[in-house]
Amino acid sequence: MPSSVEDLLHELAPQVLGALVRRSGDFDAAEDAVQEALLAAALHWPREGVPAKPRGWLVQTAERRMIDQWRSEQSRRYRESRALLQDTPRRAISDQDDTLTVLFICCHPVLTPASAIALTLRAVGGLTTAEIANAFLVGEATMAQRIARAKQRIKASGVPFRMPTPEEQAARVRTVLHVLYLIFNEGYASSTGRELHRAELSEEAIRLTRMVQRVLPDDAEVTGLLALMLLIDARRPARTNAAGDLIPLPEQDRTLWDQALIAEGVALVNRAMRNGAVGEYQIQAAIAAVHDQAPRADDTDWQQILALYELLEQMTGNPIVTLNRAVAAAMARGPSAGLVLLDAVDERLNGHYRLDAVRAHLLEMAGDTEAALAHYRAAANRTTSLPEQRYLTTRVARLLRDDRSHAGRGERPR
């Protein structure tokens, strides 16, 4: 399917869903009908051309699917209670864009993060169940059940199809941003599987965040999250080699970084920090900007990064932030400063591969090869990402090779 058609379908999917839910009041049936309409468009439009009014075409096609579905039901009572689209005179298709309303419903607090991610990608992103299942490396039936349960919970909660009130919006925006952040992270650094990246997920997260930012341009955290995504995604071309192996940040070829994304991200984070109270996404974006603006790894302003992580840690109490702060402390003040900070998260991150990976790195910096090897091996055994595992085992092999080389020259092993 031509990318222009695919992009148009992604843009129109939530608008069409919003129009149907607004008219029928049935999110579950409307969402199924929209998916069928999108599939029909994907089949017909590349051959026959995009209709003059693509949104209207999709709405009418989805409405016909809903009518067919209701007519096929055996229960007369069910048919009569859902006869709105058949019995009500045809109304003009509204130009109102309900995309943000649909996004807020998909990210409703009644859903778990996993369910919200799946429903968002399907209802707002326009992805099929098979595409979402493939992205998360689960079976299509499993993903279908996850989406079905999410829709059932939305229906059971009685959530009205409307934008949250101003009082509700602050908390709900936070949930929306969290879901988009999780989608981006899974695309940028996949937690399982053979590939380090799933570009379709990170790109979809950026597209949806741009959409939210256009509607809420004065929300500093929305702008901060978009900046963060752009600044991190700018490095993607340099994060792997031709074999798909991970290249750590200090070793990346910075000429491969996307300078246009970096410039846009820096401008956005600067604007966000002028527009209101500083939030966690803005601080993370500021950290990413410091990395991206350093011409070489040796030019990185680790003191500034450390100060930003200290502020972020105070705001969130997140142990992963403490882990990153430990790396920054080691780079700014020496490995012993970082190792001391790791003791504070031993219990909270016990068994997490990243704790072992960071401790191994800092121990290697400190010259304790034996301990570093033990933690690199532990991290490699615990990660479910094959590129991460290959990288960690490569570190082990390199340390062993260097250690033997020192021993062969009569030097004391580090």
Image (tube, rainbow, N blue to C red):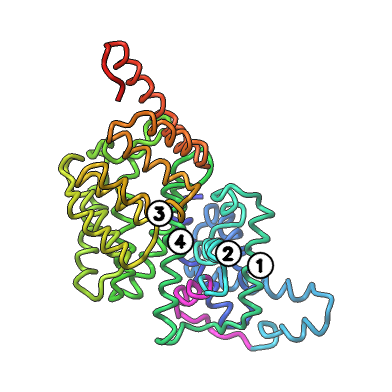
Label 1: how many Cα within 10 Å (few below 14, some 14–19, many 20+): some
Left or right: where does residue 384 sit relative to residue 68? left
Q: Which kind of residue does numbered mark 3 sit on?
A: Val
User: Spatial distance from mark 2 to mark 1, Cα to Cα?
Assistant: 8 Å
Q: Which kind of residue does numbered mark 2 sit on?
A: Ser
Q: Name the residue under label 1.
A: 149
- Give the residue at x 64% y 73%: 28
The local secondary structure at tag 2 comes to helix
Left or right: where does residue 22 sit relative to residue 176? right
The local secondary structure at tag 1 comes to helix
User: Spatial distance from mark 3 to mark 2, Cα to Cα?
Assistant: 29 Å
Q: What residue range appears in magenta?
A: 89-106
Q: Are the residues at dot 2 and dot 1 in contact (C-beta closer than 8 Å)?
A: yes
Q: Which of 5 and 338 is in front in this view?
A: 338
User: Spatial distance from mark 4 to mark 2, Cα to Cα?
Assistant: 25 Å
The answer to whether residue 98 is magenta is yes
- Give the residue at x 19% y 47%: 332
User: Spatial distance from mark 3 to mark 4, Cα to Cα?
Assistant: 46 Å
* Residue 115, numbered label: 2
Label 4: how many Cα within 10 Å (few below 14, some 14–19, many 20+): few
The residue mark sitting in front, 3 or 4, is 3
- Residue 96 locus on image (x, y percent): 45, 80
The local secondary structure at tag 4 comes to helix
Q: Name the residue under label 4.
A: 8
- Residue 180 locus on image (x, y percent): 43, 63
Q: Which kind of residue does numbered mark 1 sit on?
A: Arg
Mark sitting earlier along the chain (3/4):
4
